[in-house]
Image: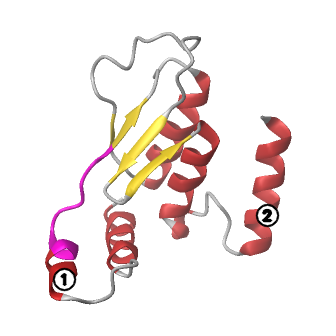
Amino acid sequence: SASCRRSFAASRSRGRSGFNIAFRQRASAPIMPMKLYANTNDYKTQKALIAARYVGLDIEVPKGNSGSSSTDGRIPVLETDQGCIFSSVAIARYISRICRPVGLYGQNLLEGGMIDSWVEFCT
């Protein structure tokens, strides 16, 4: 949703760089679409893609990745404008935390911990 994208952009603007001139210019730039390098047919990849749909994020899956075998030793990698995140669970958690109002990761630390407990139990 648009409000979650604005929330994500605002959280990005409070990043590690401080408020120097170069940072202000970068913060006003459009958000780089996130790219997910993974086999889209793998159930582990689907966790991240489903979470992205719930929070209203468009995640690009570059061509050539959707048909690769899940047994070739590759793990999913999410490329963001601030760095890369790997592992399907870590990617799903990151995406779930982007838009707090949606509530995929709970509304407080206790709820987040309870969600972590179930995610770890189920995977």
Q: Secondary structure at mark 1?
A: helix
Residue at left 38%, top 82%? 14
Q: Nearer the viewer, residue 23 or 101?
A: 23
Q: Amino acid at mark 2?
A: Gly
Q: Which numbered circle lies on residue 4?
A: none
Residue at left 50%, top 17%? 41
**Residue 30 included in the magenta stretch of the image:** yes
Q: Position of residue 107 (x, y in %)?
A: 66, 72
Q: Position of residue 18 (x, y in %)?
A: 33, 87
The image shows residue 9, relative to residue 85, as above or below, that is below
Range shown magenta: 26-34
Q: Which numbered circle lies on residue 113?
A: 2
Residue at left 79%, top 63%? 113
Q: Secondary structure at mark 2?
A: helix
**Residue 28 included in the magenta stretch of the image:** yes
Colour scheme employed for the rendering of this structure: secondary structure
Q: Amino acid at mark 1?
A: Arg
Which residue carries the number 1 mark? 24
Q: Position of residue 36 (x, y in %)?
A: 40, 36
The image shows residue 77, relative to residue 41, as above or below, that is below
Q: Quadrant of residue 108?
A: bottom right
Label tally: 2
Q: Quadrant of the C terminus?
A: top right
Q: Nearer the viewer, mark 1 or mark 2?
A: 1
Neighbourhood count class around disc 1 (C-alpha, 10 Å): few under 14, some 14–19, many 20 upward:
few
Residue at left 50%, top 10%? 69
Structural distance between the alpha carbons of marks 1 and 2: 34 Å
